[in-house]
């Protein structure tokens, strides 16, 4: 297994080089001139040259890329061009606000969607199945932005149950602020996830081992929650692992509308201000988490299914 993990890590390094190279090339060639964006068209030649030296843009593009790889290797991404703050400190400060609502939303969505999927497959082809899937499709058909605006208006203004500002409040009061973003993300994700898990479970209930369990006298509830759920763990794990890289970056719309000081907001601000160090650092972070999550995904395959061997 260790040889497999080492081999996957080496493949991950190649993926990292490819992702960082593409992003660096796109920003360097097609990202425009950040110096003119900061100084304006009336800047003098001396001011432009001075700022290019400060940003490190006076070097050839390949030399800039080597510097960037050194930053990735040492996890020291330099300073933000806009705020002059350490990019590493910015990431450390922003990751927890993002995780504070994305992680609970993922766990709740997965749990509820698995329950809905099992229930729909239990009653497949009948009224409860059709009703649950109709609700799921209806939920998917409404825009994420509509949910944010309507829920903010109804639950924060008309019926002030939740707060829409106040992440800096004490931990005992912060739940009133985080609850609404979590509820919105769960409702939005539940439709997509329920339909996916329903198809997984429906495919599983027609397999031979389920028929054998029924023939041995196992109850329908035991079959659904023991045999079917256990054998459907691999697609569930895959679905969850796919979402892991996006937990850290948060949701751009949620963070923008609720003022969450997370990495999604930081990335949006960096794009608006052409803050290349922040964009490159967050891109590298997403790539690293993606590589690690895929390796963890394969390891969990072998844990839940003895037939899977890591060779």
Image (tube, rainbow, N blue to C red):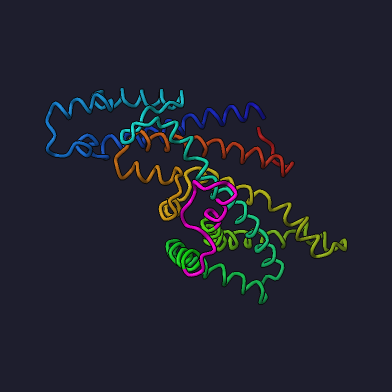
**Residue at image location 52% in from the left, 70% down from the top:** 138
Up the image or down, 145 lies above or below 239; here it is below
Q: Nearer the viewer, residue 301 or 266?
A: 266
Taking the image as shown, residue 25 lies to the left or right of residue 37, namely right
Taking the image as shown, residue 297 lies to the left or right of residue 78, namely right
The N terminus is located in which quarter?
A: top right
Residue 156 pos. (x, y %): 48, 63
**Residue at image location 57% in from the left, 39% down from the top:** 293
Up the image or down, 261 lies above or below 48; here it is below
**Residue at image location 64% in from the left, 51% down from the top:** 236
Residue 240 pos. (x, y %): 59, 48
Up the image or down, 289 lies above or below 174; here it is above
Question: Magenta part of the protein: which range?
Answer: 158-179
**Residue at image location 58% in from the left, 46% down from the top:** 171
Q: Residue furthest right?
A: 217
Residue 221 pos. (x, y %): 79, 63
Q: Residue furthest bottom?
A: 127
Report which quarter residue 59 is drawn in.
top left
The C terminus is located in which quarter?
A: top right
Residue 90 pos. (x, y %): 43, 35
The magenta stretch spans residue 174: yes
The magenta stretch spans residue 293: no
């Amino acid at each position: 297994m260790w040889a497999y993990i080492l081999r996957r890590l080496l493949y991950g390094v190649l993926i990292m080089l490819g992702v960082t190279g593409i992003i660096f090339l796109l920003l360097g060639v097609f990202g425009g001139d950040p110096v003119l964006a900061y100084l304006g068209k009336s800047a003098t030649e001396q001011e432009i040259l001075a700022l290019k030296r400060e940003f490190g843009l006076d070097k050839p593009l390949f030399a800039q890329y080597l510097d960037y790889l050194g930053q990735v290797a040492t996890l020291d991404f330099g300073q933000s061009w806009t705020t002059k703050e350490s990019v590493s400190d910015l990431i450390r400060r922003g990751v927890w606000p993002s995780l504070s609502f994305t992680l609970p939303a993922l766990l709740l969505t997965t749990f509820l969607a698995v329950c809905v999927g099992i229930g729909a497959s239990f009653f497949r082809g009948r009224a409860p199945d059709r009703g649950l899937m109709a609700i799921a499709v209806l939920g998917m058909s409404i825009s994420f932005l509509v949910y944010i605006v309507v829920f903010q208006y109804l639950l924060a203004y008309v019926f002030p149950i939740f707060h829409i500002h106040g992440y800096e409040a004490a931990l005992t009061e912060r739940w009133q602020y985080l609850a609404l973003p979590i509820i919105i993300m769960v409702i939005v994700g539940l439709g997509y996830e329920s339909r996916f898990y329903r198809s997984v479970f429906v495919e599983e209930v027609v397999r031979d081992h389920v028929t054998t369990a029924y023939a041995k006298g196992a109850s329908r509830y035991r079959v659904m929650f023991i045999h079917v759920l256990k054998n459907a763990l691999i697609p569930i794990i895959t679905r969850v692992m796919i979402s892991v890289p996006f937990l850290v970056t948060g949701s751009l719309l949620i963070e923008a509308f609720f003022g969450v000081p997370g990495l999604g907001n930081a990335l949006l601000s960096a794009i608006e201000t052409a803050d290349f160090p922040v964009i490159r650092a967050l891109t590298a972070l997403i790539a690293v988490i993606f590589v690690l999550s895929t390796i963890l995904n394969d390891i969990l395959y072998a844990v839940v299914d003895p037939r899977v061997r890591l060779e």
